[in-house]
Image (cartoon, grey):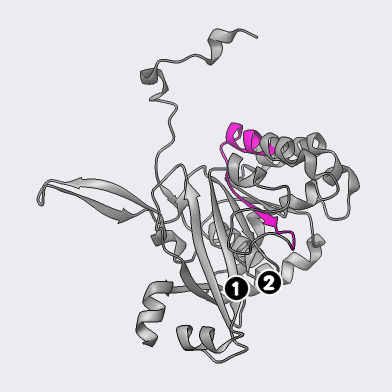
Amino acid sequence: MNGKDYVYELRELKEKAPKLIGIPTGTKLDEMFYYVEYDEESKKYVKKPLGGIPYLAVMNVTGIPDTGKSLLAEQFAVVQAAHGYRVLFVTVEAPANFLYPALKQKALALGYDFSEVEKNIIIIDASQEDELRENTRTLLDTMAYVIREKKTKNVIIDSITGLYEHKEVMARQIVRLIFNFLKRHWQTALLVSQKRSAQASESAEAAGGLAVAHIVDGTIVLDKKIIESRWDSSLYKMPIGSVLRLIRIDGCRLAPHAGDTYVFEITDTGLIDIKMSLREFIKRRE
């Protein structure tokens, strides 16, 4: 290895730098990432929606159970496939055949032609193959084959936690291998990660500690708050026993983003519908 191969003058990176464009998710997240542009007329910098998660970003999607992590990943996959971009979906938790009806329902709910969607999503079923889950190199070799042969542009791993669930001390090493692999192959990716019961529901931390959040480009945190007290009921103007679902972007090194927490709903058809900021939600109810 020649050390000089990894030394650059900044100007030498101009042609290698990726463009800052948005990759649509089909949710209001597309408006929550933005870029800043100088407006000659007003002589001010103005914010403009990026239109999706940043191109080539590797994003961590974390949250406690039943917060909509997999639904968000599936919605992203369907939206990208419907627009003609191939998606590699690595399923680590649920067997591949259970993905078919879930993705079909989302395509129909979004008004897309499912025949277009189903030909653009390629699935690696790691849920029933120990070698793919336990040997990261084998999984990456399989992913490299799919990316090369099927010309995929996006990758989803649901969940990355399943690749180190019995060896969390190796979480950082495994996540780093996958992150570097995705960067080398120019893929935009969502990595779904699970939380342990002792971890704060609103934090970016997941199984393996902050290994995922520290290495990847950014984190999207999904949370749910059960209205259990009169105080909560008074603050949110919701009856006791109801559920308030929350989403926020917990940092992204590739693009500016909204700093607020937002309220969202899961529709009857399993879609993520982000409504408004939590601040606006409370203000309207008052």
Q: Which residue is mark 1?
A: 224
Query: Can you say whether 279 is above or below 228 in the image?
Result: above
Give the x, y percent position of residue 75: 58, 65
Give the x, y percent position of residue 198: 73, 61
Are the two marked residues, 2 and 1, in contact with CB atoms closer than 8 angstroms?
yes
- Identify the image quadrant of residue 214: top right
Amino acid at circle 2: Asp
Residue at position x 55%, y 12% in the image: 5
- Identify the image quadrant of residue 268: bottom right
Q: Is residue 192 magenta?
A: yes
Residue at position x 57%, y 69% in the image: 113
Number of other residues with Cα within 10 Å of mark 2, as a class: few under 14, some 14 to 19, many 20 or more: few
Residue at position x 78%, y 38% in the image: 170
Q: Earlier in the sequence, mark 2 or mark 1?
A: 2
- Identify the image quadrant of residue 33: bottom left
Q: Which residues are magenta?
A: 178-197
Instruction: Give the numbered dot on residue 66.
Output: 2
**236 or 107, nearer to the observer:** 236
**171 or 23, nearer to the observer:** 171
